[in-house]
Amino acid sequence: MFFPNYDARFRYPGKIGQIRLFRETDTPHPETEIFRNTSDFRTRYPDDGYPAFPVVFKFDWGGEGDTVFLLQTPAD
């Protein structure tokens, strides 16, 4: 075994893939919700309902924090 394990990297691509890997291996990680798009978000949080803030919003792509944002209010 060596790090990084490129087999896992290609089998579980992106941040969504990482969450799938963590869930499948029971690896501890922060509470996470995955939304495929804004319609998916609105289905789960209708009528301007929102998850508890603050939250960390991450796109499925990017690296080294490029597409990671701290949201402290719905306006963010």
Image (cartoon, rainbow, N blue to C red):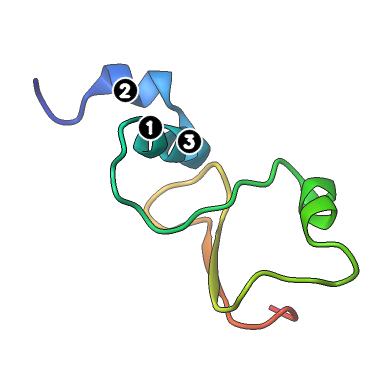
- Tell me residue 16's x, y (percent): 51, 38
Res. 34 mark: none
Which residue sits at x=58%, y=50%?
59
Specify whether 16 is left or right of 45: left
Q: Residues within 10 Å of mark 1 (few under 14, many from 20)?
A: some
**On-image quarter of the C terminus:** bottom right
In the image, what residue type sits under mark 2? Ala
Q: Which is nearer the N-term, disc 3 or disc 2? A: 2
Q: Residues within 10 Å of mark 2 (few under 14, many from 20)?
A: few
CB atoms of marks 1 and 2 within 8 Å:
yes
- Tell me residue 8's x, y (percent): 31, 22
SS assignment at label 1: helix
Farthest residue, direction right: 47
Which residue sits at x=31%, y=32%?
25
In the image, what residue type sits under mark 1? Leu
SS assignment at label 3: helix
Which residue sits at x=47%, y=32%?
17
How far apart are labels 3 and 2 at the CA level? 11 Å
**On-image quarter of the N terminus:** top left
Res. 14 mark: 3
Which numbered disc, 3 or 1, marks the residue closer to the eye? 1
Which numbered disc, 1 or 2, marks the residue closer to the eye? 1
Which residue sits at x=44%, y=40%?
19
Q: Which is nearer the N-term, disc 3 or disc 1? A: 3
Q: Residues within 10 Å of mark 3 (few under 14, many from 20)?
A: some
Q: Which residue has dot 1 on it? A: 21
CB atoms of marks 3 and 2 within 8 Å:
no
Res. 8 mark: 2
